[in-house]
Image (tube, rainbow, N blue to C red):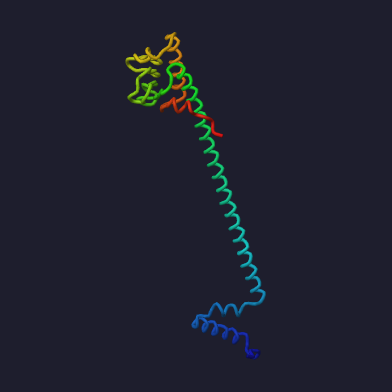
Amino acid sequence: MDFTNLSNEQLLDLLKELMAESIKRNITTAAREVLLTEKEKAEIKDAAARRAKEQVKQDEIRELEREAYRQEQERLTKSKAEAEKQRQIKNWQFEKGIAQELQLLFGTDLKISIWERSAGVDKRIYLKKGDYFKGKEIATLYVSGNAKIPPMKMVQESYFQRCTIDGAEDVVAKTKEVLKKVSEYYKHGKIDCNEALDFELPA
């Protein structure tokens, strides 16, 4: 098709008519591409390539960030687990030491209960032989005391007298000393002295 004889105005009118027709036929995208120069096409391709490259870069950054976060979470989890392991070992070592001291006084099958009515109120340390609840009571240390009993007073039950060896006064003092250690180490809880005696450090 030869458009050399058309004036600029006629050529513009023709373009308008062509665009109007392309809209009717729903081929505007194809029509625009026809009108683009090779330079414009190259610029558009370059811009698209830059956007794609930037998107890839951003995706890589996000992936690195996710991996770094995962590794940090894993490190924190391991650190927390190790801290908990060390805490348990420390507790078991403490309990074994307590059990060994009491074993020299009262033998085995001992149970210790750390109890308090509320935080810091009427705290007591119970020492029994046998079951935590139904076992024979040996002694009770009233750590914080109450309306009837002063703080840090130890009450020895009748079974205590039958358990002790020669030097009862020394046994009383030693028992109180051991139960005091327990009160300072634990706020509440229980210690099975038989289990504590069997504790061995993990390999």
Residue name at image x 52 percent, y 84 percent: 21
Q: Is residue 67 above or below residue 125?
A: below
- Residue 102 at what x, y percent from top left? 45, 19
Q: Quadrant of residue 142?
A: top left
Q: Is residue 67 above or below residue 13?
A: above
- Residue 54 at what x, y percent from top left? 62, 61
Residue name at image x 48 percent, y 19 percent: 101
Residue name at image x 35 percent, y 19 percent: 137
Q: Is residue 155 visible?
A: no
Q: Is residue 46 visible?
A: yes
Of 72 and 136, the residue lying toward us = 136
Q: Is residue 85 left or right of residue 128?
A: right
Quarter holding the N terminus is bottom right
Of 41 and 119, the residue lying toward us = 119
Residue name at image x 63 percent, y 67 percent: 49
Tally the marks.
0
Q: Is residue 123 above or below residue 168?
A: below
Q: Is residue 111 left or right of residue 198?
A: left
Q: Is residue 150 above or below residue 20?
A: above
Q: Quadrant of residue 108?
A: top left
Quarter holding the C terminus is top right
- Residue 29 at what x, y percent from top left? 55, 77
- Residue 4 at what x, y percent from top left? 66, 89
